[in-house]
Image (cartoon, coloured by chain):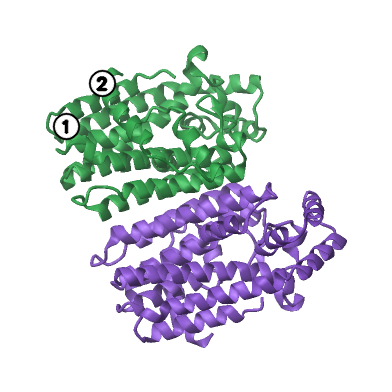
Chain colours: A green, B purple
Amino acid sequence: MNFITPYVTSIENALGSLNLPETPHTLYDPQRYMLGNGGKRIRPVLTLMACGMCGEKRRKAMPAALAVELLHNFTLMHDDIMDQAESRRGIPAVHKKWDESVAILSGDSMHTRALLVLNELDDSVDFRKINALFLTGINMVCEGQALDMEFESRDDVTISEYMAMIGGKTSALLEAALQMGGVIGDCNDTELTALKQVGKNIGHAFQIQDDWLDVVADPDKFGKRVAGDIYECKKTYLMILAFERCNKDQKKWLRDCLRNKPLGDKNVQSVIELYRDFNVIESARSKMEELYDSAEQSLEIFGETEDKRDLIKLIRTLKKRDH
Amino acid sequence: MNFITPYVTSIENALGSLNLPETPHTLYDPQRYMLGNGGKRIRPVLTLMACGMCGEKRRKAMPAALAVELLHNFTLMHDDIMDQAESRRGIPAVHKKWDESVAILSGDSMHTRALLVLNELDDSVDFRKINALFLTGINMVCEGQALDMEFESRDDVTISEYMAMIGGKTSALLEAALQMGGVIGDCNDTELTALKQVGKNIGHAFQIQDDWLDVVADPDKFGKRVAGDIYECKKTYLMILAFERCNKDQKKWLRDCLRNKPLGDKNVQSVIELYRDFNVIESARSKMEELYDSAEQSLEIFGETEDKRDLIKLIRTLKKRDH
């Protein structure tokens, strides 16, 4: 991923210059903790690349890139409370290291900070348009997370409902990241639509890949328990596809199975066998690859720039990830 | 409060026209529940009044007024989780009627919605300035809430720290509400500073009055347990003043007392006696009245308008409230 280093370095430098206040400690220490704890910075990189692809210097999009990264970290802080996650990127989640109130409030402050940083964009940009793209994206992330939680108590989720859910939870912020960069780079309407499509496809591909890796990943590289989603009865792309493909009796067995969370080893193995029998794992892989390819194709309308070449490399790198 | 009816009616109508989406239900039902559950709408009224006072039609400030009311309701939703409050305005708090995850996420969506509605302001306004005032205000509310939580585990809070805390928790959004209205009404810098001062003083007065009413309110009108703040060992204006005024032995007794939350009836009575001995109750009342009077005085620089007369009436009505 050498091609991505200049982007990430400039983002890390800008994050380092944010100068969050020292106090109140319970408000700002968790924000520093989250931002200092790595993360791949994919979203802000997309913002910089989109800006460059549309003809402006990447640097001009930095406030939007930072806003996207801050927003992403805020959603992680709150999601970890809702999902009762113990850790994030190998260290305790904020609500575990401090407590839930601290995680709620620091997240709220980070949400606001993202918008404050966005407000620093150059006067020459169409700020209202960028602001609307960002805020609409954020609200779609909330909608996606709400659907994901609603799915937990349902056993009739369809693939189209699943796609709508990840369209919010995973794609919406990627779409906003790319579109904001595009508007700052002074893109035209066709380019703006293409950028939305790129974000949507990368997001959908990434999430289906996550679901797929849960079953096929090499345990030594994965960093999480293989088949963890099955143990936790998650409504993944694979699980929903299995539901759609299996017969009435198998459907009844699967439904009964999922009512007793977490699943035992034996049932997890049976679910994986069901996946194999109905070609679900292979379907997920090919859907994911198809979506990454579509993302790349949507870039055809853009002229040749270093940013575009790097974005294509990024999409291909993501497509090949194995953990 | 007849004078306030036209303002509140227009705000209720505009809230009714917000048309939040129907689904996901777990995201939008709690937002409708909060907004439909009354509230005095003081903050958005202030925005409309400030706009009118500065020379534009009130209506022009409606998106900012709605943004302020949405934001306020978002903070209540999250505060109720952090404070483990059972109810809000006489009905179950969102995190009790649904659950904590729903309250976190609906609040996040309402936070974003507030900013989306603000983005609808007329093109003729200085949007970046208004946006910055609002976002800075929101972040100050977060800082105030963080300080309030930090105070819980401290017994050396000073009056000046307390004033900083309520300056965030209570005043910041009132300041923003008035200043945003002022900028939309095309105020000058002197007027903007005066509006900030009005908001600050009303907020400080209102919070000290809350602390004071906790001890002196008529139990039949109050709607909460009288002396509830003392039972809960809250660091109120009165408690901190008592700490500052009593002698070393009394201070030690008070400190030991507050370590065993909640207090028993006997200790609560002793604290109230201490308040009486050190004239704390009377000091709080006179501080509160002084702050309301200062708020009114800051309005002197504005020309005579119906909005200004109504704002003065509002300040005097607040000053006289007894529950």
Can residue B305 be spotted in the picture?
yes
Kindly identify the amino acid type of the residue bearing the numbered disc 1: Glu
Q: Position of residue A224 (x, y in %)?
A: 54, 21
Q: Secondary structure at mark 2?
A: helix
Kindly identify the amino acid type of the residue bearing the numbered disc 2: Phe
Labels 1 & 2 near each other (Cβ < 8 A): no
Mark 1 or mark 2, which has the lower sequence index?
Answer: 2
Residue at x-position 17% and y-position 47%: A189
Count of numbered badges drawn on the protein: 2
From the image, which quarter does the N terminus of chain A lie in? top left
Left or right of residue B51, residue A243 in this image: right
Viewer-proximal residue among A20 and B121: A20
Q: Which residue is mark 2?
A: A3
Mark 1 Cα-neighbour bin, 10 Å: few <14, some 14–19, many ≥20: few
Q: Which mark is residue B155?
A: none
Q: Position of residue B242 (x, y in %)?
A: 72, 62
